[in-house]
Image (cartoon, rainbow, N blue to C red):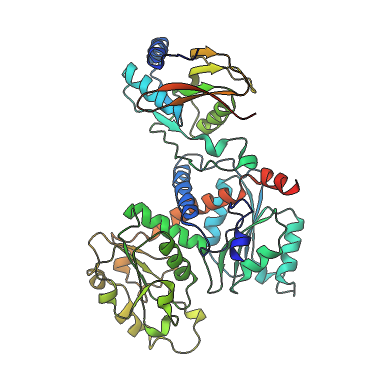
């Protein structure tokens, strides 16, 4: 479990995604790790339109609790999402709250035809009824463990113990 | 005192009252956050849900069009409910004191006040009076401070010039009456702009202006030579008592910004003005409408900067208040 080969997982994700290309989809990665994964998948699949990136800081549900992320970046969708099939990419699916925020933000840009959720890692601990459509690896972690993607040059996964 | 009011005990921005007392990192955080809000203003649905359910009162004891409107738009784009009040034509006229007006609005569960007042120090007075969970942004107090204008000016300079190091900035005109100039000078000093000049007749400069960390000039051609940024100020005729300028024609001839005077600045110099402009008095129309003017982008940027300041002071309040109760 500690040794997930990110490159190999990316290649298998890309193969699972290949049939979707028929729908002429656009790809959106969630800052920061999801954007790295999206860029790699985009390159492997040879998609022509640039990827979009989302920073969901303005849509988080914990703003009144913890405030604004000090490293907030601008979201950038270089295409019109109206009536497009969207491949939404994140590195780790955990509580589902990030994906909820990302979908809310996407709908403030337009009305996509569909959204497909692709994640490198699917872990336990869901707090919302959100599931991924295409998954690289599924891992079970203890509640005090987090899995983190480091990059962007050499993508690698680290499991960290966090303070209880 | 300012510092105590502006920050909570964890050092986070609580009210936004003046540039003085802010750390460079706080100013940079506001500028960086504003950069992200620019893209919100460019999309189809120009709204994010950060301040949903919050009540913002724009309380303008002194009139304003641009500042009040951009604050209103900023709050609405953050999904807050916004009330605009001009108490000088209602409650104040009937004899109510400023603090009584504030107490009444606070009783209506206002979360954030945006206050402009003709008297210097009014924002501090009100902030000191408010219960700690209510926030305040100073939208201009007398001759003292206009910190959100300084932030949007700094943001505009950074957008065009990328970096503050190595810049020469000239602030031209009625420095004496200008809260914009005072706040901008503080901001540029904190951000490390190496050369800030003020260009004005002696009658429109405060005494000992050098102590603010600026180089005074009385001649436009000397003051504008080789500068990267020219900030023109409005001649505040309504604040002038006595004859500070000989005549408007004479003022324009000597200090009005024309293409000819601007020609001594760097080729890529930008021209800013906080508005409202007096065309033909402090600035010639050819410059105001010319390619180097960034006066309208300043207005657009003002919305993003005000969104950033509101979001930064309003965020995390639940945790902060819980902490306060422990």
Residue visible at 42% across and 60% down?
Answer: B153
Total numbered labels placed on residues in the image: 0
Q: Is residue B1 left or right of residue B160?
A: right
Image: A77 above or below B264: above
| Quadrant hosting residue A40 | top left
Dividing the picture into quadrants, the one containing residue A42 is top left
Q: Is residue B188 left or right of residue B254?
A: right
Q: Is residue A94 above or below residue B78?
A: above
Q: Position of residue A25 (x, y in %)?
A: 40, 20
Location of the N terminus of chain B by quadrant is bottom right
The C terminus of chain B, quarter of image? top right
Front residue (pair B212, B81): B212
| Residue at position x 42%, y 80% in the image | B205
Q: Is residue A149 left or right of residue A128?
A: left
Q: Is residue B43 visible?
A: yes
Q: Position of residue A113 (x, y in %)?
A: 48, 22
Q: Position of residue A153 (x, y in %)?
A: 35, 27
Residue A138 location (% of width, % of height): 53, 12
Note whether residue B275 is visible. Answer: no
Answer with left or right where residue A121 lies relative to residue B98: left
| Residue at 52% from the left image edge and 50% from the top image edge | B308
């Amino acid at each position: 479990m500690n040794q997930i080969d990110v490159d190999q997982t990316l290649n298998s994700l890309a193969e699972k995604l290949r049939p979707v290309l028929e729908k002429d989809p656009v790809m959106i990665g969630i800052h920061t790790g999801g954007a790295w994964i999206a860029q790699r998948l985009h390159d492997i699949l040879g998609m022509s339109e640039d990827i979009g990136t989302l920073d969901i800081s303005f849509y988080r549900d914990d703003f009144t609790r913890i405030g604004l992320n000090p490293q907030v970046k601008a979201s950038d969708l270089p295409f019109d999402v109206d009536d497009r099939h969207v491949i939404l990419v994140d590195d780790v699916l955990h509580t589902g709250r990030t994906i909820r925020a990302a979908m809310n933000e996407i709908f403030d840009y337009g009305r996509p035809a569909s959204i497909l959720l692709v994640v490198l890692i699917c872990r336990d601990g869901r707090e919302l009824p959100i599931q991924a459509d295409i998954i690289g690896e599924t891992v079970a972690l203890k509640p005090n463990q987090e899995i983190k993607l480091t990059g962007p040059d050499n993508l690698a996964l680290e499991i960290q113990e966090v303070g209880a | 005192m300012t510092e105590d009011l502006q920050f909570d005990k964890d050092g986070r921005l609580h009210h936004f009252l003046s540039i003085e007392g802010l750390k460079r990192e706080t100013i940079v955080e506001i500028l960086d956050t504003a950069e992200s809000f620019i893209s919100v203003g460019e999309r189809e649905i120009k709204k994010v849900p950060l301040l949903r359910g919050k009540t913002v009162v724009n309380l303008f004891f002194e009139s304003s069009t641009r500042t009040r409107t951009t604050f209103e738009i900023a709050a609405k784009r953050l999904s807050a409910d916004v009330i605009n009040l001009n108490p000088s034509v209602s409650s104040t006229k009937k004899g109510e004191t400023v603090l009584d007006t504030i107490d009444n609005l606070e009783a209506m569960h206002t979360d954030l006040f945006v206050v402009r007042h003709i008297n210097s120090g009014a924002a501090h007075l009100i902030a000191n009076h408010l219960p700690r969970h209510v926030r305040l942004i100073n939208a201009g107090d007398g001759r003292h401070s206009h910190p959100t204008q300084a932030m949007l000016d700094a943001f505009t300079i950074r957008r065009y010039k990328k970096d503050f190091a190595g810049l020469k900035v000239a602030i031209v005109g009625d420095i004496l009456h200008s809260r914009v100039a005072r706040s901008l000078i503080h901001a540029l000093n904190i951000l490390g702009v190496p050369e800030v000049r003020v260009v004005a007749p002696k009658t429109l400069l405060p005494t000992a202006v050098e102590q603010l960390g600026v180089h005074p000039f009385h001649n436009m051609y000397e003051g504008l030579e080789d500068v990267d940024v020219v900030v023109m100020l409005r001649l505040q005729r309504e604040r002038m008592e006595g004859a500070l300028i000989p005549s408007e024609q004479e003022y324009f001839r000597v200090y009005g910004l024309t293409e000819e005077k601007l020609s001594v600045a760097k080729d890529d110099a930008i021209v800013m003005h906080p508005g409202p402009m007096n065309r033909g008095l402090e600035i010639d129309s050819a410059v105001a409408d010319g390619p180097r003017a960034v006066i309208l982008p300043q207005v657009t940027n003002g919305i993003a900067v005000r969104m950033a300041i509101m979001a930064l002071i309003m965020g995390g309040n639940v945790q902060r208040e819980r902490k306060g109760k422990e």
